[in-house]
Amino acid sequence: MQISFGKIFLLLASLGVYLSAGYWSINTLSPTYDEAFHLTAGYIMLEDQDYQYQGLWHPPLAEMVAASGLYSIDSSKNPTLDTSQPRDRQKENYIVADAFLYENNLDAEQMIRAGRIVHWLVFLPLLLLSLWSCARLLSPEASFWAVLLLMVEPNLLAHGTLITTDFSNAVLSLAGFTAFAWYVRCQETKRAALVGATWSLGWLSKYTAVATYAPLAIWGWLERSRLRIHVFRRRHILAALLLFILPFVVVFQFNSPLIFFKGFGNTLVSAMYGRENFFMGQHSREGWWLFFPASLALKLPLTILATSISGYFLAFMHWRKTRDRTIVFLLFAPAFLLLLACQSKIQGGLRYVLPVIPFLLVMGGYALARIANASRIGGLVCMLTVATAGASAYRVAPWFISYYNAIVPDPEKGYEYFTDSNTDWGEGLGSLASYVIGMNVSSIYLSYFGTARPEYYGLGYIPVAFSSDIPRQETPGASPTSERRLLLAVSATNYQHTFGEDKTIWNFLRSRTPIAKFGYSIFLYDITDDSDALRRLLKLLQQGNQHDQAEKLESYLDQTWPQASSNTG
């Protein structure tokens, strides 16, 4: 297919906007919950070849890619690993990660940004290539539109610009599918080798990537009679096997990959035990079948949803004529992934089904290609469709984690539907600190969901009902009652009581309006003149055995509202 100059210009322009938005996000968001952990894990594996630190939770590929960015910060020095304190890295992995990020010879945000940039720039080109190639399975024109839809899809952008294993999983799941589909069609040794490489890299990026291979194995079985002459040639099997093993050898640096298979087993077990989840005002450790379908329905731009559904319908009509199994498995592969996720008891956010989204973009691209080819007006309609999705996605920039479509008309209300990585992953802490310091306030009461250090941003705080894998102590000298305004900041995940036994502790804030919100995920309240809120805050400090701070607040209440203080008991 020859692509016109106009289309090339449009792709480059949209890519420029996409890269600019991603760079903005990389530079704005505070370290999200798991980023320090992933970055530290990657660096430990690169420097010490220690795969025990987090091997039971994540494969090493994406983390090692991100950590390689740390070598680019300062050519005269590399980050240090503090081994002076004997710690059990596996049991205290978040504490070790916190020390690595914030007690290093390099700046914490420089380290995070370097890891994010390298991670994104390694996997984004592979996503573009895989998306283009996969859409070509349906029609040459579909590739252009599929890539254009990617440029206005906020969820892949949100997670691609973070240090996680979710984006690489989405990319390599599509790459593995595409490689296999082209092998079935062309039956060449080089394509067999590509299947082995992509499947191996996918599994090395996320344990759950293996779910992508089950539909492809079924596809191969159904095609066995047509492919028998080729599939069972020795060179095809040898090429696929060799390129499957080679990434394991390189990534594990000739060490035993036994920890990898232990981690895979641990992932299967943890999915059955579950954890606390929040969904539309409800709490559960068992999860909900509708959680992930609802996440897709609310967090994808409506025009992308509409074009994807249209694409599947048009592809089905085409399948009725051709019986091309590529179409069947473009539906079955993401449906299988979504079905498995729906049965999981771990439902932290859309990122668990992120591999579904590239398949939807492929089908959306197919629908737009069909419409655009129908008439000139059809092409204009397609352009308007993409522009509408872009306007929806970029209105929340750079806070793409908190994106919701028009079904949730106000993105500031997204926390009413989902928390955790769908809305609040700790990313707004730096913006909160800048705002508070700009008010000439140096310390606040803070209920934060995340692992970033507030004091790194110059924010003094008294922790109240924190939700973190890192025990945080109050900032020395912090005294919110001595400030010109008495402020309380609460993360959306804590506001909805996602984690913890008491699901009512912040209910008293529901009748109060925050003076500011940060990243749609942290709410700031001025409770200087709110005796009832201060009284309830005092109870929380007493329940948390924060006796010194409780005494200070009680003294403040005694001086300002004696009656409010006397009613706390």
Image: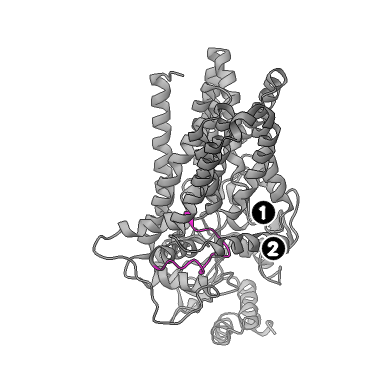
Residue 276 image offset from top left, x and y in percent: 69, 64
- Distance in Å between CA atoms under marks 1 and 2: 30 Å
- Camera-side residue of 45 and 151: 45
Amino acid on which the number 1 mark rests in the picture:
Glu
Q: Hey, which quadrant is residue 544 in on the image? A: bottom right
Residue 223 image offset from top left, x and y in percent: 67, 31
Horizontal side of 76 relative to 22 (left or right) equals left
Q: Which mark is residue 269?
A: 2
Residue 61 image offset from top left, x and y in percent: 48, 55
Is 131 part of what is drawn in magenta? Answer: no
Residue 165 image offset from top left, x and y in percent: 52, 54
In percent of the image, x 40 and y 41: which residue is there?
19
Q: Which residues fall within the magenta stretch?
A: 48-62
Sequence-wise first label, 1 or 2: 2
Nearer mark to the viewer, of 1 and 2 = 2
Q: Residues within 10 Å of mark 2 (few under 14, many from 20)?
A: few
